[in-house]
Image (cartoon, rainbow, N blue to C red):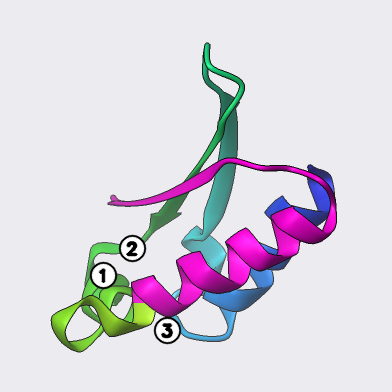
Amino acid sequence: MENVKEFTEKLVLGLVKNPEIVKVQDFQDEDGSITLDIIIHSDDIGTVIGKSGATIKAIRTLVQACAYKQNISKVKVNVDSI
């Protein structure tokens, strides 16, 4: 799981203007799925979500592919700002 978390953090760090704020927290749900919360500065929210959500959809796809490669079947990715 640590590799998926690190991968997600590296993806987001490459996009934002405030990298010192970026944190990725992971939680395991009751059903066994894993939720990754990406915490970013409020100024970067538009960049990470992208036009019509295209960027966050791409991030979710890449994270799910990374998780699948490590035999993790269910991963959710959420974005929060501070």
Query: Label 3: which residue?
Result: 17
Q: Identify the amino acid type marked 3.
A: Lys
Q: What secondary structure is marked by label 1? A: helix
Asked if the residue at tag 2 contacts the one at tag 3, i.e. Cβ–Cβ closer than 8 Å, the answer is yes
Q: Position of residue 46 (x, y in %)?
A: 21, 78
- From the viewer's perspective, is 38 left or right of 79? right
Q: Nearer the viewer, residue 31 or 51?
A: 31
Disc assigned to residue 81 = none
Q: Nearer the viewer, residue 75 or 39?
A: 75
Q: Position of residue 28 (x, y in %)?
A: 60, 23
Mark pair 2, 1: CA separation: 7 Å
Q: How many marks?
A: 3
Query: Label 2: which residue?
Result: 41
Q: Identify the amino acid type marked 2.
A: His
70 in magenta: yes
Binning the other alpha carbons within 10 Å of mark 2 as few (below 14), some (14 to 19) or many (20 upward) gives some
Q: Earlier in the sequence, mark 3 or mark 1?
A: 3
Asked if the residue at tag 1 contacts the one at tag 2, i.e. Cβ–Cβ closer than 8 Å, the answer is yes
Residue shown at the point (44%, 81%) measured from the top left? 16
Mark pair 3, 2: CA separation: 9 Å
Q: What secondary structure is marked by label 3? A: loop
Q: Identify the amino acid type marked 1.
A: Ile
Query: Label 1: which residue?
Result: 45
Residue shown at the point (36%, 72%) measured from the top left? 56
